[in-house]
Amino acid sequence: MKTLVILGASGDLTGRLLLPGVGRLISSGRAAGLALVGAGSDDWSPEQWQERLTGSFADALAPGGQSTAGGIKELASVQKNSHYQQLDVTAPGALGAFLATVEGPVAVYFALPPAISQKACEVLKKQELPAGTRLVMEKPFGSSAESAHALNETLASLVAEDHIHRVDHFLGKSTVLNIMGLRFANRLLEPLWNGEHIAKVEIIFDEDLALENRARYYDQAGAGRDMIQSHLLQIMAIVAMEPPATLGETDVRSSIAAVLRASTVGRTADTDPGTASRRARYTSGAIEGRPVPDYLSEEGVDPVNDTETLAEVEVFVNNWRWAGVPFILRSGKALGRTRKEAVITYKPVPHLPVGFTGTDSPTRLHIGFGPETLTLDLDVNGPGDLFTLDRVQLETDLASDPLLPYGEVLEGVLNGDPLLSVRGDTAEECWRIVEPAFAAWKSGAVPMEEYAAGSTGPANWTTSND
Ligand code: NDP
């Protein structure tokens, strides 16, 4: 890839996540020969753009990072040659004419509000795109299965599917490869990785961050659309997928797609989705001594949106391996404890020899995401009375990539590898799975519960090892 064009160059995502990711990627020597161009609707001076780059790249140059001498030199040169272009991407012909001036092949990153990205793609024409163009789309990808399908059709009229990168920065290389390495490189685990032996799987993403001035986006999305519809379903699919023959994108993404096609909220497609999902919203409280206001009184929040800040859905993967095993996907904000992990709970042993006393808890495997960790909870004898079982944890760190999540995503884009990008059909499947739950919430069939900011959630919601 020769040029990365960031549309929405003045935006929040670009400044906070995208450019720092670009900086790390280049400074670590993993993106040689790249040119960088920013575009936005504001009339920015070259100095403003350079200032933004300097601020965003500072972290990549800080001591202790993974930067190389060559990478640092390269980053300075990329910054010096980078320029900003004022552009209304929704004006017919404007984006196409601009792309014709850029040295190809080009990766066009749509860091724009979703409606603007969609409009920009609708006015683009295939013949305007330099050969080899890759289109990089942010979340949310559509707002329903139907709108995601329409957006997929628009994109398919421009470039081939393997040149479309639907970003899910949770699908960083470390997360995906750590789960696959653990599952498929250990004979001990995979034969027991099914409904015969596993009682339930929880995928939990609890944050201690509250709204953090993001009402404009979050109050329209809520925990369900922000986290469960996209990130958590994709992680679930990697936990549940059949072993792929290779780590090539076709094998891996087809295995992911097969899981999602088989999935429903509730035990079957006919289950009342209201009984298989819950939602709640935080009230005022404190997190580590920091006061947090009631969600509804946060600036920019409209109570009419009826937005949840904590959500849980019970998904079933209706195939031979997983029939009857609940996959509980939960995510929320303003919780007292940050918790980002998949928890696999095994069924009890068929018979515990009479005579043992003490702990008799199920074997549990925790795969932590950020930090990347692995913990196995086992019951073992002693210390002390050998007839008494005690709980122990075997723990290790898993590999993590020094690139920031967006650096990992961009590396895939620039290398032309869509392995970590969400495939078009699965983007639609994810909406199809959760839409019945969202409809039940909207109809009021699922009550909005409450929890104090800084707590672990509503009193009756429990997850493993709470
Ligand atoms: P912002 O509103 O901060 O930025 C949007 C950008 O789009 C601005 O640079 C704006 O330029 C530009 N823009 C708007 N209209 C046009 C137009 N017609 N032509 C050219 N540029 C235009 O949004 P975010 O950065 O927060 O979000 C961008 C995308 O990333 C969204 O899809 C969001 O869902 C996604 N995302 C954001 C995250 C975040 O933390 N911010 C996290 C994950 C995903 P100007 O200001 O000049 O109008």
Image: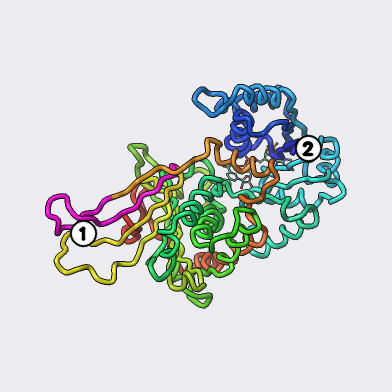
* Residue type of the residue flagged with mark 1: Thr
Q: Position of residue 403 (x, y in %)?
A: 56, 36
Residue 366 appears in the figure: yes
**Direction from residue 134 to residue 243 in the image, left or right:** left
> Residue at (69%, 27%) from the top-left corner?
49
Q: Position of residue 115 (x, y in %)?
A: 69, 51
Q: In the current view of this chain or complex, which residue is farthest to the front?
A: 187
> Residue at (12%, 54%) from the top-left corner?
385
Closer to us: 215 or 317: 317
Type of colouring: rainbow
Residue 206 appears in the figure: no
- Say which quadrant the N terminus sits in: top right
Range of magenta residues = 371-392
Q: Which residue is mark 1?
A: 359
Assign the magenta stretch its main secondary structure: strand
Q: Which residue is mark 2?
A: 87
> Residue at (16%, 69%) from the top-left corner?
354
**Ligand 1: image quarter:** top right
**Direction from residue 320 to residue 115 in the image, left or right:** right
* Residue type of the residue flagged with mark 2: Leu
Closer to us: 2 or 88: 2
Mark 2 Cβ and ligand 1 under 8 Å apart: yes
**Direction from residue 424 to residue 445 in the image, left or right:** left
Callout 1 secondary element: loop
Instruction: Please count the marks in the image.
Output: 2
- Say which quadrant the C terminus sits in: bottom left
Q: Is residue 446 above or below residue 422?
A: below
Q: Position of residue 198 (x, y in %)?
A: 39, 66
Callout 2 secondary element: loop
Q: Is residue 166 above or below residue 315?
A: above
Residue 445 inside the magenta-drawn segment: no
Question: Within 10 angstroms of label 2, few (less than 14), some, or many (20 or more) residues?
Answer: some
